[in-house]
Amino acid sequence: MLQLIRKDLMLQKNTLLIMLPLLVVYIALNASATILSGVLFTIAITMQAFMLDEKRQIHILFNSLPYTRKEIVTSKYIGVFCFTGLVLLTILIANLVIHGESPTWKELLFILCLTTLFFSFSLPFSYRFKSQYLLFASIGTFAAYLVVINVFIPNLHDLIREVVAFLLAMEQVQLYVLVGCALVIVYILSWLLSIRIYEKKMF
Amino acid sequence: MENVIELKQVHKSFPNFQVKDLSFSVKKGFVTGFIGGNGVGKSTTIKMLMNLLQPDAGTISIFGMNYNKHEKEIKQRIGFVYDENVFYEQSTMLDMRSIMKSAYAKWDDELFHYYVKEFELPIKQKIKSFSKGMMMKASLALALSHHAELIIMDEPTSGLDPIFRRELLDILHSFMQDGEKTIFFSTHITTDLDRIADYITFIHNGELMFSKEYYQIEEEYAIIKGATELLDRDTEKEFIAIRRSNHGFEALTSNKAQASHLFGDSVLLEKPSLEDIMYYTKKGAEGGAAINT
Amino acid sequence: MQIIISNSSNEPIYEQIYSQIKRHILTNELKSGQALPSMRQLAKELDISVITTKRAYEELERNGFIYSVVGKGSFVSEQNNEMIKERKMKVVEEQLLSAVQNSKEIGLSLNELLDLLTMLYREEL
């Protein structure tokens, strides 16, 4: 299974060599958007890695190699953390070197939470449907989002920013633990669901 | 004799097609050719053998083990070749080598480089730029480099030129030398089989027609040619299917001895090709024994 | 050892191999004790399936022309002259028996048959 994760990292070598420096440049230009850039870069890099494997032929390849379907799915769920870790590390180092200060641990944790949440939903979706539908779904969601902020709540963006600021400002450790636990449970449920979906899949 | 693959009463249903009550075995140390027309269940069966599909009922055992409990052990010992490119489009042979190498415990770099050299494969060129023949050689090199005991191939010769088909048979002959290896491959190019296949497994419409030694087919089956007057309700029963024309009839029998006894010297008896057998079996299954032209 | 296979012949390939190896043995071209190529080796060289050579070897072994040692391969048997003679004798007997049967069917008497046989033997016909 470790081999599968290593394979994802290896295949993304080129993407990483482009995306991570890009992230550094982005941080150098704009120090304030750590969370947004962190989440976007993590999602972009990880999705790129996963979409490569979405082809029927590649499913056939890995299912013919000595791996179980459980391992194939699990490797993706662990892979998410590897890619997130790489992005967080880049953010940390780039901020330290360029701006001489590290982002708060809360910010980093927040990125981790958001990506975890994103993949909890997108991974089972990708296993159930094809990747291009995920793209359609994302575009659909994004369009809906645009409509919502423009028509109904023009200040949604500000609202979100406030909520984020509120969450980051919060001091209660208990609440963090609670949110953390909830996310872990969601992620595990998502993992179990993906395994169930993938084990029934036909190629 | 030891069986490497054993299928027992395997069923698999799809909305418009099903594999019914499929039971056969593949003997260790031999080459089994898996024949049948297009869309009769060859690929479905191969996918079930690779656990890409699970049967609805029945059991499949490979090396005496089943996929529920021993998926990884089984697949460690199988080399696979498909008729489509199952590799990453952007990857080279070197990239694929590292993926395969990390998957197989017995991967052998020396062997891999031997095959790469033997097949004249460019290892740094992207696989998607390979010709059909090169792609096949690449799949074969990757399938043979981890000391697999069983090679499963889906239509390996389709789309290959005759010269390379002959080369492929040579490679397979060499692979079989130690008597420990087994090959199971599907094909609809039956002329490849008489040079390599020890056993023939023939399916039609998701059902097994027969699975037997190649020479047994020649001994049991025959094409009978004769004058149409010889045909009547009784004699027609001897045939799997009959092809009539204005100039006589041609028919396939699965009981050469009896037909020879029945018709004696009044007919011509010929050795049937596998294509003859496939053709007449299909016609016979489609409705009655009569084919009029 | 030369073996020529015809794919267009009506004679099964295993029989072609069988009779050619047998001839090599009977003409002493293959000496007793001499090793034959392995079944798989021969199959590869003749570009035919292993089961075909296997069948030819089995047949040769059954008729006492060769013997096999597990793990070592197949070897030409000691060709005992008495044994060969005995075997041939049996074949002659069988052939004569069918000649007798055919003669009886068409009412050929023993004397007539003997005359015919004598002429055939002396190659007078």
Image (cartoon, rainbow, N blue to C red):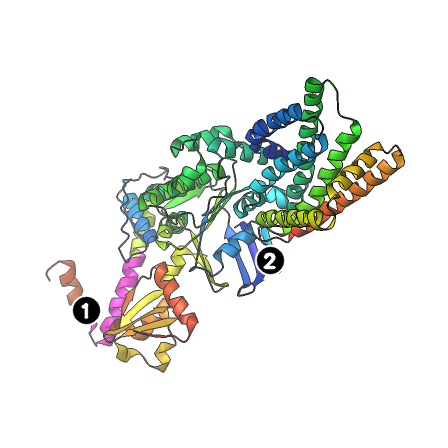
**Camera-side residue: A203 or A102?**
A102
| Chain hosting mark 2 | B
Question: In this picture, is A131 found above or below A3?
Answer: below
Question: In this picture, is A5 found above or below B281?
Answer: above
Total of numbered circles in the picture? 2
| In-image side of C80 versus A14 (left or right) | left
Q: Is any part of residue B202 visible from this angle?
A: yes
Residue A109 among magenta residues: no
Question: In this picture, is C72 found above or below B43?
Answer: above
Where's residue B209, x and y in %?
Answer: 46, 64
Helix, strand or loop under label 1? helix
Magenta-highlighted residues? C90-111
Q: Amino acid at mark 2?
A: Pro
Where's residue A124, x and y in %?
Answer: 67, 48
> How much space separates mark 1 and mark 2, taking CA atoms?
70 Å
**Camera-side residue: B208 or B222?**
B208
Q: Which mark is residue B55?
A: 2
* Residue occupied by mark 1: C113
User: The C terminus of chain C appears in which quarter of the rendering?
Assistant: bottom left
| In-image side of A190 versus B233 (left or right) | right
Q: Amino acid at mark 1?
A: Leu
Task: Residue at 16%, 59% (x, y): give it.
Answer: C121
Q: Are marks 1 and 2 on the same chain?
A: no
| In-image side of B253 versus B211 (left or right) | left
Where's residue A179, x and y in %?
Answer: 83, 40
**Camera-side residue: C22 or B17?**
B17
